[in-house]
Image (cartoon, coloured by chain):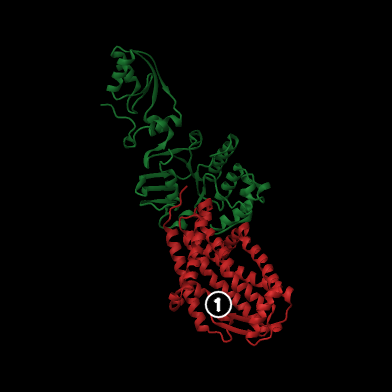
Chain colours: A green, B red
Amino acid sequence: MLSVTGLYKSFGGKPALQDVSFKVEPGEIHGLLGHNGAGKSTSLGIILGMVEPDRGEALIGGVSVQKDHAGALRQVGAIFESPAFYEYLSGWENLRILASYSGRFDEKEARHVVAQVGLTTRIRSKVGSYSHGMRQRLALAQALLPEPKVLLLDEPTDGLDPEGIKWFRDFILGLRKERGITVLFNSHLLAEVEQMCDRVTILQEGRLVYEGTLQSLRDEAPVYEVALEPWNDARTFLELNGVKVLSPGKIALPAELDPAIIVAALVGSGIRVSAFAPVRRSLEDLYLEITSKPSKEQALPFLPLP
Amino acid sequence: MNFLIQLLGELRKLFGRRRTYMGYVVFLVMEAIILTVFKLPASQRSMRELIERNGLGFTEYYSSLTVTYWIMGFSMFLLGSIYFALVAGDIVAKESEDGNLRLVLARPVSRLRILLLKYSAVSLYTVSFVIFVGITGYAMAVMALGWDGGLFIWNFKMKVFSAFPRDEGFARIAMSSIGIGLSMITLSSIAFMFSCFKMKPAAATIVALSILFVDMVLQEFPFFKPYEQYFITWRMSNWVYLLENNISWAKLAGSYAFLFGLNATLFLIGYTVFRLRDFKT
């Protein structure tokens, strides 16, 4: 449904994106993650045709954003962090004006969307009087007019209270369920991404460091909590066998290595194994593990066993 | 049809802002001041001298039409230009600065169309503003001086001297208000072009006004007198030829073709810069 291929972009000679490619399948909620300056906004800018790539292309529904801007964006609705509306106009007028750029404004459809986002009673008030949460709801309404196939969400829950975040999450999940809408979701709130996204793309310093499901990210380098004695001997043994020691008592195994073999080898080497249990890591753990490494090592988080 | 609907939206945005009305209020106040001044005996004395020196009757030509000409002809360049530059300088740069433009650019609409819409809105504002000043100026002058009386024109700089009876004077004033409006689009075009650059709205306004005033000042230098036809403000002043006894259509066509070509060039430069800009958080 949405793909970017070989994106390169630099600003003032400083590379912002280097050979970034990823795909979002139809009906998928896809998280785009990375530190500040990792290239997330530049990627979204290129997908929306606001930023011209030096090389590469973004396709939406098979239509190139760079070659047929209007054709590609006809399928998209977008929400930005702190959406800037025309404050001196009402919410309804904002919707009417913004939807007119897409070629049509259907009042019935607009009323339905406004009701969906819960803004019916305030839609005729000036946007200047709206709270942050109401602005985000209005942003969602304008993104849904006219009915898009893809939603691009740039930090949509930033600044919302927990209730607002939950409402937003449920709304997006509901949209996917009802309409099969495809969502590309850029957020710093990793817990949100973890709850919503089927797959994630992680960028670091303008390069792609991971693309896939959260489960395969976990499987790629499962982490175990261990109790081994003597620890120093155990550590040397593990490192010699390509096992990454994250901290005393915490290790990461390469995906292809069977933990039973390691346990047997440890015992065979005279090391006492009193605990060896898998740890379920959150997206935050995984994200920090990946992005704390130098970006050149990317894609292969752990070295294979010799 | 879509373009018209989008243009209505653009006008709604433009006229929804309070600052758009600032110029209207200032001109209403200024018209009232000019009319008060024209009622003063000292002011009437100098007008009487000017009119009678040219062999015309003061009571016939010291009229609402003549006062309207003075209001429009002498205030639009100095005072009106501020508001045209302000509105046109804002039109792209302010939306870019405030972030509204990102919501528009995320829509399936080309950058050329976005700029055409904004340029059309600014042009309509410019022409309608001049017409507004003409109508309100005339209405206030009628309240002060009555309906009767012809139109007396004396423009030393453009060498135009003429007098018209009331009905023809009225038609000439109406034509010249459209002429001024079309001329002032050039100033709006300069501000619009800078508004498309990556700069603050205030900077776009100030740079446009600076160009206008520098052009105006240089034109007054005797050295540049032989080249006056190359000055933007001289061309913009050519609307006065609509008030000649025998209108020189060729001269007018030449000047408006010059201004139209300049406006198109300014738009294209603005578009090229805007087209090449990256819009990012």
Q: Is residue A267 above or below residue A256?
A: above
**Could you tell me residue B179's position as x and y percent?**
57, 75
Question: On the image, which quarter does residue B246 sit in?
Answer: bottom right
Residue at 66% of width from left, 63% of height from top? B25
Q: Quadrant of residue A234?
A: top left
Q: Which residue is mark 1?
A: B239
Q: Is residue A228 above or below residue B3?
A: above
Q: Depth check: give the residue in front, B275 or B221.
A: B221
Regarding mark 1 in the picture, which secondary structure is present there? helix
Residue B263: tell me if it is visible.
no
Indicate the position of residue A70 as horizontal and vertical percent values: 47, 57
Q: Amino acid at mark 1?
A: Trp
Residue at 61% across, 49% down: A113
Taking B184 as reference, is A233 left or right? left
- Identified at 59% across, 60% down, the residue is B14
Mark 1 burial class by Cα count in 10 Å: few <14, some 14-19, many 20+: many
| Above-or-below relation of B59 to A245 | below
Q: Residue B138, how many percent across, how many down?
A: 68, 74
Quarter of the C terminus of chain A within the rendering? top left
Left or right of A78 in this view: A109: right
